[in-house]
């Protein structure tokens, strides 16, 4: 009689494992333990329990069981080969093993593989009584085949411990079954990748307790993913429990959490557990869970209390255990110190179409004629699996007319099932966070995060915490460029919450954002106190209608109106004072192209915190004679207004003011004690006194062409940023500004002196481009990171007396600098010195520029062009350099103009792929600085460059460096000169050379020893040296052009076994050497003779 373990198994096989063994040897010990270990793992195993087999042939049932098994575990023991039944069983197993889908594993219990393979030792003795039988040879073959398979040998595994040995066998079979038996429902599109990503995060093999979180919006597939992961890895754990709907169950009754604890304990302990209360459950879990390696999934958690009750601490569990938690609220995971949190990815367009098609059409692609409609539905779903499945199921079997009707309905009425699922995240929010969420859904989606924070804070909300909570609950997203986003369905859900109480009466909605509805309400004077926020993107009516229509909206806190461009000025001017209305409840007012000269007389602004009126016609806040004080106003932006003066007395608590591009501004009536941000760019101000704004942090005076004086007090402790470009300042004293971080005096063409009397330890950015500055001392600004001095024609000295370890960017282009000391700037990354024509000295010892990634010396020193780039960060496994150096003769030396010797300059392009510079760049600079002499060759300093793999040298020079052989890494060498007669002998030392090109070698008369040759241009060469044939392992291409005198090729040319291309141009060659027929590769030949 056969006994079997129970589990779920793939349909193609009845059994996971078939055990083949000799009963008298192992039935009651090893095999019995192995069988039960497999059974405990849920592995469906066949074990023949018959003690005595009558007859000589195995039964048909047994043959069928072998055929219906996936894996075979053959336990070879001393007497296995004595049983013809076992041997027949083995023959059948080996037949099946050769068929797709079956695998056999030998277990060498108390025999060795060689004994089974060759029937030696105890196996020979056991087989003796069967050796004369008709099937003996067949059995021998089966024994040998089985012994040759990969399996397990007790003696050499786990030090011979049977229990550990069995555990290893079961583990390995479990893993095999995981990868083979685990299949995804065909409707779970895209699930395989997502599941495997989570599985890799679990790192099941690591012997520690690990908690992993999966977060995402409702309907995104968190539960589906967690269930699939659970099914995928559960076989590797001693106990498992999947706890679904934690949020719902825990809140359904007072005993909800206790019930969940009972479920977990009952599942993991495999016994019915009853608890008195939650504390009792915690104590039992602490005591009982630490002895088992468990897999626990807690699905849809929404409160820390639930995790504290069900998986309080890692030490509750045995090492190797894994706890997987799904939630909509990331903060729950953060508060519980979950090791890793993974976002659930929504479906791609391709996946979405596939999933929808499977539900709607029962196939992977839409049916013909439904492609466009399917794309419309999928576009509406925006990658949300729940919506896709619901709509796919709903539209299945419907005709085109019904499809069109359904898609049109979705444009007006959101899908109820999706909305209910998503709204659960909203319901759990605190009241003020609900308000923030609705503001974003209706008004602020798509705005920069900092702007949204500013608006929400002006409206009285704690915005930073609020946005974080919403992001953690997957209700909003924040893009890489810091913009607020929201899934289309969540936005739709938020707007639906606002509309659903009065679906046909928008004037009773708390937020208005649809232009047509707003214009209708304003035109018909239907406003109500219900409206809190209004955003009119582009007013199509005139200003008179807008301003009158706002009269009944007494509770507005946020108003945004974008008037038509200056609207109708005549209407604006004819509007009487009482017809203009803005609610006194307003906290944030934003208008563009505001057509009026002043704020309305009826507007008190008692609650106004933020005022944003860009592109307005305003000339003052209030009409002449009015002096309303806006005590709560903190933020004002009146950019591009017509203001001529601004009086801070009306805004005593103002913190930020932008009057950018207010071209008529001539006066600021100070002081303002709380101001920390001021932008008065493009104004007509002539002077500005920083002493009247003691708390100022940022001052922007860009393009203030009339500014001649900036008065600095003794101390500006809070000042961090100053931008005064394009002004008429002549001098500027930084005074005591210990927190100053950036200073820009760009394009101040009259500026001659920057006075730094006291240390500025935080100054990181300094821009003095296009000034008339002559010198700069960095002693008191040692932490500078970027320094711009481009186009400072008078600049002659940069004094670096102390280390500047943070200076990474230095731009001195087109200055009159004569010398530059880089010794004290060890971390420089980019250096611009192009067109510093006076520069004759750079002090940079080897290693000084080891972090420079870009250097430009165009027009400096001896270089007409010099450009250096480093690519180390991109290619960390590569160490090489590339140099192209071209010499040009000049009539006058740039460094020694009085010299009578012939002179030259060079064009240099150098790139390196090195982890740190080996001094090459400093050597090239040194080469550029060396005094001009009668150059008959390129200086030998080139030969000291390390890690150089590619070198190009060209110019009107008759001799190249003799020591080129020192470039031991060189792989490509390109030489070009019309004057050269001989190649350096040392080229033969270049063991790694793969390519040699000699161009324009019209005077080249002979070639000596070569390691490689790729192409050659010369009219003087008569024969190629026999040494070329030494390149038989490397040379792939041989090209000789313009070889007018070339008469003979090497006789052993056929030894070039790697040669693929042979190009010859000569009228003197009569035939190829006989050995050329030995060339093994198919050669592309080109000849002219």
Image (spheres, rainbow, N blue to C red):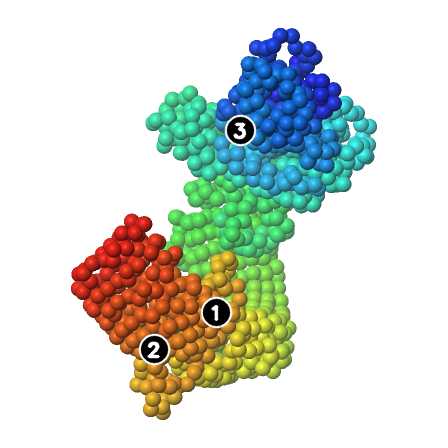
Task: From the image, state whether disc 3 or disc 1 is nearer to you.
Answer: 1
**With respect to residue 285, does 674 lie above or below?**
below
Identify the residue position indicated by label 3 in the image. Answer: 184
Task: From the image, state whether disc 3 or disc 2 is nearer to you.
Answer: 2
Compare marks 3 and 1 and give the one earlier in the sequence: 3
Compare marks 1 and 2 and give the one earlier in the sequence: 1
Q: Is residue 1012 visible?
A: yes
Q: Residue at x 42, y 68 (%)?
A: 989
Q: Nearer the viewer, residue 541 or 151?
A: 151
At label 3, counting other C-alpha atoms closer than 10 Å, the crowd grade (few under 14, some 14-19, many 20 or more) is some
Residue 341 drawn at (x, y percent): 62, 43
The CA span between labels 3 and 1 is 56 Å
Disc ID at residue 1058:
none
User: Residue 474 occupies which quadrant of the picture?
Assistant: top right
Identify the residue position indicated by label 2 in the image. Answer: 959
User: Residue 696 occupies which quadrant of the picture?
Assistant: bottom right
Q: Residue at x 45, y 67 (%)?
A: 968
The CA span between labels 3 and 2 is 72 Å
Q: Nearer the viewer, residue 713 or 889?
A: 889
Task: From the image, state whether disc 1 or disc 2 is nearer to you.
Answer: 2
Q: Nearer the viewer, residue 531 or 711?
A: 711
Mark 1, secondary structure of its residue: loop
Q: Residue at x 60, y 18 (%)?
A: 131
Residue 901 drawn at (x, y percent): 34, 89
Identify the residue position indicated by label 1 in the image. Answer: 946
């Amino acid at each position: 009689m056969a006994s079997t373990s129970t589990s779920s198994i793939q349909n193609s096989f009845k059994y996971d494992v078939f055990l083949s063994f000799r009963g008298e040897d192992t039935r009651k010990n090893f095999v019995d333990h192995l069988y039960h270990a497999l059974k405990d793992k849920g592995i469906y195993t066949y074990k023949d329990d018959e003690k005595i087999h009558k007859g000589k042939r195995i039964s048909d049932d047994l043959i069928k069981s072998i055929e219906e098994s996936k894996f075979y575990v053959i336990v070879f023991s001393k007497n296995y080969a004595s049983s013809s039944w076992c041997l027949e069983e083995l023959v059948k197993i080996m037949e099946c093993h050769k068929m797709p889908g079956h695998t056999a594993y030998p277990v060498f219990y108390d025999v060795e593989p060689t004994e089974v393979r060759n029937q030696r030792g105890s196996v020979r003795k056991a087989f003796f009584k069967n050796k004369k039988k008709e099937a003996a040879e067949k059995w021998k073959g089966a024994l040998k085949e089985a012994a040759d398979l990969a399996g397990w040998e007790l003696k050499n595994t786990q030090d011979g411990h049977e229990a550990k040995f069995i555990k290893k066998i079961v583990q390995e079979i479990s893993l095999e079954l995981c990868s083979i038996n685990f299949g995804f429902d065909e409707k779970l599109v895209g699930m395989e990748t997502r599941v495997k990503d989570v599985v890799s995060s679990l790192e099941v093999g690591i012997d520690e307790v690990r908690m992993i979180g999966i977060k995402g919006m409702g309907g995104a597939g968190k539960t589906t993913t967690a269930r699939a992961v659970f099914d995928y890895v559960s076989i590797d754990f001693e106990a498992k429990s999947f706890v679904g709907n934690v949020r719902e169950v825990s809140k359904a009754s007072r005993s909800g959490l206790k019930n969940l604890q009972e479920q977990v304990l009952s599942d993991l302990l495999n016994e019915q557990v009853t608890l008195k209360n939650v504390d009792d459950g915690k104590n039992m879990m602490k005591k009982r869970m630490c002895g088992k390696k468990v897999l626990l999934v807690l699905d849809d958690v929404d409160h820390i209390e639930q995790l504290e009750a069900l998986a309080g601490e890692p030490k509750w569990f045995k090492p190797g255990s894994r706890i997987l938690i799904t939630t909509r609220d990331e903060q729950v995971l953060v508060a519980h110190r979950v090791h890793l949190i993974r976002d659930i990815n929504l479906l791609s367009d391709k996946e979405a179409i596939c999933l929808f098609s499977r539900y709607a059409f029962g196939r992977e692609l839409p049916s013909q004629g439904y492609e466009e409609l399917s794309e419309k539905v999928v576009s509406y779903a925006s990658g949300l699996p729940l919506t896709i499945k619901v709509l796919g199921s709903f539209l299945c079997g419907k005709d085109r007319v019904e499809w069109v009707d359904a898609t049109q309905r979705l444009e007006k009425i959101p899908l109820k099932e999706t909305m209910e699922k998503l709204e659960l995240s909203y319901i759990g929010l605190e009241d003020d966070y609900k308000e923030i969420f609705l503001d974003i859904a209706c008004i602020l989606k798509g705005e920069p995060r900092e702007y949204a924070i500013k608006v929400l804070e002006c409206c009285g909300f704690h915005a930073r915490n609020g946005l974080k909570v919403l992001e953690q609950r997957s209700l909003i997203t924040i893009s890489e460029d810091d913009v607020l986003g929201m899934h289309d369905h969540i936005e739709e859900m938020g707007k639906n919450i606002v509309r659903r109480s009065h679906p046909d009466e928008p004037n009773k909605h708390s937020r208005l954002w649809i232009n047509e509805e707003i214009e209708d309400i304003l035109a018909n004077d239907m406003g109500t106190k219900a409206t809190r926020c209004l955003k009119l993107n582009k007013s199509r009516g005139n200003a008179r209608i807008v301003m009158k229509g706002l009269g009944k909206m007494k509770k507005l806190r946020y108003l945004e109106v974008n008037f038509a461009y200056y609207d109708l000025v005549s209407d604006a001017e004819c509007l009487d004072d009482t017809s203009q209305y803005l609610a006194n409840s307003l906290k944030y007012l934003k208008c563009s192209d505001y057509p009026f000269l002043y704020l309305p007389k009826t507007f008190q602004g008692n609650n106004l915190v933020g005022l944003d009126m860009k592109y307005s016609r305003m000339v003052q806040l209030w009409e002449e004679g009015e002096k309303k004080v806006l005590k709560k106003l903190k933020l004002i932006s009146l950019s591009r207004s017509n203001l001529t003066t601004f009086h801070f007395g009306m805004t005593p608590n103002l913190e930020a003011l932008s009057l950018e591009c207010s071209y008529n501004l001539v006066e600021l009536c100070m002081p303002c004690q709380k101001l920390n941000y001021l932008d008065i760019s493009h104004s007509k101000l002539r002077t500005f006194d920083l002493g009247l704004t003691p708390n100022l942090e940022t001052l922007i005076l860009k393009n203030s062409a009339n500014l001649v004086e900036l008065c600095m007090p003794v101390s500006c402790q809070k000042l961090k940023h100053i931008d005064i470009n394009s002004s008429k300042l002549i001098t500027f004293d930084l005074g005591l500004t210990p927190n100053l971080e950036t200073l820009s005096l760009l394009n101040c063409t009259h500026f001659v002196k920057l006075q730094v009397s006291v240390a500025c330890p935080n100054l990181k950015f300094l821009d003095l481009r296009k000034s008339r500055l002559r010198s700069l001392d960095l002693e008191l600004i040692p932490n500078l990171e970027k320094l711009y001095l481009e186009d400072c024609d008078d600049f002659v000295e940069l004094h670096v007396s102390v280390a500047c370890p943070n200076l990474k960017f230095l731009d001195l282009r087109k200055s009159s600098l004569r010398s530059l000391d880089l010794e004290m700037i060890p971390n420089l990354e980019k250096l611009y010195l192009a067109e510093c024509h006076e520069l004759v000295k750079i002090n940079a010892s080897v290693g000084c520029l080891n972090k420079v990634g870009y250097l430009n010396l165009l027009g400096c020193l001896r270089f007409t062009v010099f450009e250096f780039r480093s690519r180390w960060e991109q290619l960390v496994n590569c160490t090489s350099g590339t140099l192209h150096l071209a010499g040009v003769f000049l009539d006058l030396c740039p460094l020694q103009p009085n010299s009578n010797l012939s002179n030259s300059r060079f064009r240099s392009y150098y790139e390196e792929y090195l982890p740190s510079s080996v001094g090459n760049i400093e050597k090239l600079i040194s080469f550029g600085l060396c005094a001009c002499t009668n150059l008959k060759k390129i200086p030998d300093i080139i030969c000291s460059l390390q890690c150089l793999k590619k070198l190009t040298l060209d110019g009107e020079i008759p001799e190249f460096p003799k020591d080129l052989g020192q470039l031991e890494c060189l792989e490509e060498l390109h030489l070009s000169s019309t004057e050269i007669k001989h190649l350096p002998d040392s080229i033969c030392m270049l063991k790694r050379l793969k390519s040699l090109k000699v161009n324009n070698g019209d005077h080249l008369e002979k070639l000596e020893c070569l390691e490689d040759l790729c192409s050659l241009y010369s009219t003087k060469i008569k024969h190629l040296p026999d040494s070329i044939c030494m390149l038989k392992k490397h040379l792939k291409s041989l090209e000789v052009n313009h070889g007018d005198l070339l008469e003979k090729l090497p006789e052993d040319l056929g030894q070039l076994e790697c040669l693929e291309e042979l190009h010859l141009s000569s009228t003197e060659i009569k035939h190829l050497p006989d050995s050329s027929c030995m060339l093994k590769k198919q050669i592309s030949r080109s000849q002219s003779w």
